[in-house]
Image (cartoon, helix red, strand yellow):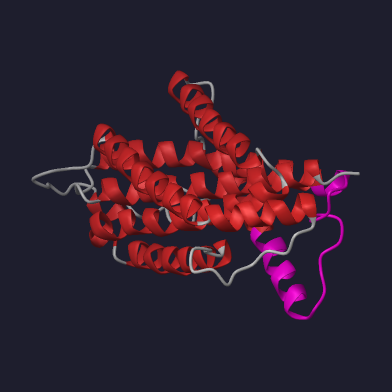
Amino acid sequence: MMRSANPTLKASTFEQYRGFEHSTTMTVAGTVNKTFIMLLFLAASASFAWNQTDDWRVAAMAEVTEGAAVSSSSSNVVNPVVLMVGGLVGGGIFALVTIFKKNWSAVTAPLYAVFEGAFLGALSALVEVQFPGIPFQATCLTFCTLGGLLAAYKSGLIKATENFKLGLFAAMSGLFLIYLVTFIVALCGGGMPYIHDSGPIGIGFSLFVVGIAALNLVLDFDFIEQGSEYGAPKYMEWYAAFGLMVTLVWLYVEFLRLFIKLNSRD
């Protein structure tokens, strides 16, 4: 039985398709094409959100360097927080729909990419104001990590064995508990010490999370191959591409957090 740490790619997803015949079935090449299409949607949406915040970003940078106040009275000034919230909420909705209605993936997965692109573009604009260059560095490292782990997986250097999956699942469960406790503490007006700071412990924690997010790519690759072998229906290509996109978005955000901590050190 397959075990995946990615919550969108459950172990039992393909069991129902074993032995079934479909007129068109899932293939690795088809999933790669769908992933590329989703990346185009995400990149276009992120670029749009980034460009929409140009005036705000220029004014915010002026405030940082010259102490001038940012004016949002102009109709041309778009606050990236608005785009972030809209993208996050919209992406969350379409992610849930995709998870529970996999046969709708051909429609909902691209829409998820569009909304997540708006979220990432606005988030990157915010980070760029305080830490110029970090979004570009995080983008480069995300795709370098994707390419490196794909090469390692295809060469057999890294294999998605049952022990590998079990260990990663345990690590993801621990992370979930940490995030849950952090959320509860934040609701009570507090904060988790050390792990979210820019000290050695906080940086070490971010490195750990980046590593876990990166290794989830291996499970995504394995999920795609398993789907092809099981003869899953064609729409599962969109679902598998969606799962890979979820991991890439998570990895990019964690790279941003890591670089912010590194650049925030005294």
Q: Residue furthest top?
A: 155
Q: Is 198 within the magenta?
A: yes
Q: Residue furthest bottom?
A: 188
Residue 186 falls in image quadrant = bottom right
Q: Residue at image x 68%, y 68%?
A: 180
Is residue 94 visible to the viewer in this orientation of the structure?
A: yes
Q: Residue at image x 23%, y 60%?
A: 103
Q: Residue at image x 50%, y 39%?
A: 217
Task: Choose between 72 and 236: the one closer to the eye.
Answer: 72
Task: Choose between 119 and 130: the one closer to the eye.
Answer: 130
Side (left or right) of 11 relative to 57: left
53 w.r.t. 140: above or below: below
- Quadrant into which the C terminus falls: top right
Residue 115 screen position, x and y as percent: 41, 59
Q: How many marks?
A: 0
**Residue span colored magenta:** 176-202
Q: Residue at image x 46%, y 28%?
A: 150
Residue 168 falls in image quadrant = top right
Task: Choose between 238 and 175: the one closer to the eye.
Answer: 238
Q: Is 173 within the magenta?
A: no
Residue 253 screen position, x and y as percent: 60, 49
Residue 50 screen position, x and y as percent: 50, 51
Is residue 4 visible to the viewer in this orientation of the structure?
A: no
Residue 57 screen position, x and y as percent: 61, 53
